[in-house]
Amino acid sequence: MIEVEHLSKRYRRVTAVDDVTFSVPDGVITGFLGPNGAGKSTTMRAMLGIDRPTSGTALIDGLPLSGHNRPALVAGAVLDTSWFHPGRTGLAHLETVAASARLPVFSSREALAAVGMTTAARRRVGAYSLGMKQRLGIATAMLGKPRNIILDEPMNGLDPQGMEWMRTYLRSLAGQGHAVLVSSHLLTEMETLAERLVIIGQGRLLGEWETTDLALTRGREARISTEDNARLATKLSGLGVTVGGDAEELRVAFDDAIPDTTALSRVCRELNVLITSLGEEPIRLEDLFLDLTAASSDYTAGDERL
């Protein structure tokens, strides 16, 4: 289990992470989301002891990673696949890492086999595709068969077959009791892969949820088209209801004033506005993410003049 408690990291005048607290329990996949510059990489580096927190703690199985006698047996990570030496073979890379971690030589071949890379063992890493490097990164992380896994963008560069393999592999790790933290910008992927979600923005925790509960926490919405969307939008806004969409279709967030489609239909009837289409759906993770991080994105198109 990974526990981040009141973690802060400052670089001179810049606060990269500000009092962040969350957990990554055993046996589930936790998605770690946030806009660029939100502090995800800094947080993961602090977990691994690469960066020392300014304050707070990052504990893995109850201790800082540096406090364990055999760190490779406790945590494995892939933060960057560009550090592999291009002149080494995949097997030589793993053997080098295994030796530095005091792991048996056979663990290198076992790790390669686990990620389906046995046939590429003696090919130089410089000739690997990005997807093959991702698999080699996973093999590197799993050399010591650690209980805790920390992965930064593991789906990058994978084709559909590679993504399906990655999903299956990560789910199998969680099913075996591993704590798996996955940072990703692929929101649709995280919605189906992760059982828990942690979202940060500008270094601060925005929320921690069970994936199945997040949409319920944030509500549902209706999509409606009428003969006079502008008039309906004005009426709903006057009731304090959140309305989005465009001239063709409105998105109406349910709340106490408009709790369901029946109430929405009643408003249309009172306005004598004809409904041409009406449907209800859960709010997508992408919509929730954009809503949660709207005020914490460092770069927003159209908000500056050059």
Image (tube, helix red, strand yellow):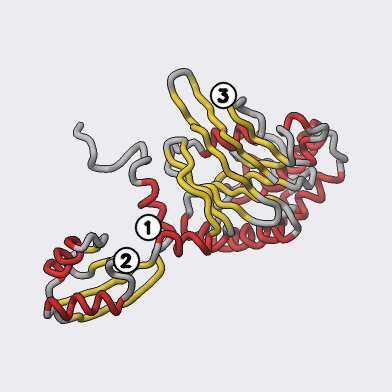
User: Disc number at residue 176?
Assistant: none
At label 1, counting other C-alpha atoms closer than 10 Å, the crowd grade (few under 14, some 14-19, many 20 or more) is few
Residue type marked 3: Thr
Residue type marked 2: Asp
Q: In the figure, 22 relative to 70: above or below?
A: below
Q: Residue at x 12, y 68 (%)?
A: 231
**Farthest residue, direction top:** 12
Task: Label 3: state its secondary structure.
Answer: loop
Residue type marked 1: Asp
User: Disc number at residue 287?
Assistant: 1
Q: Which residue is mark 3?
A: 54
At label 2, counting other C-alpha atoms closer than 10 Å, the crowd grade (few under 14, some 14-19, many 20 or more) is few
120, 247: nearer the viewer: 247
Distance CA(mark 1)–CA(mark 3):
33 Å
Q: Residue at x 23, y 69 (%)?
A: 249
Q: Residue at x 77, y 49 (%)?
A: 111
Total numbered labels placed on residues in the image: 3
Distance CA(mark 2)–CA(mark 3):
43 Å
Frontmost of labels 2 and 3 is 2
Q: Position of residue 232 (x, y in %)?
A: 16, 69
Contact, CB < 8 Å: mark 2 with mark 3?
A: no
Locate the C terminus by quadrant. top left
Q: Which residue is mark 2?
A: 256
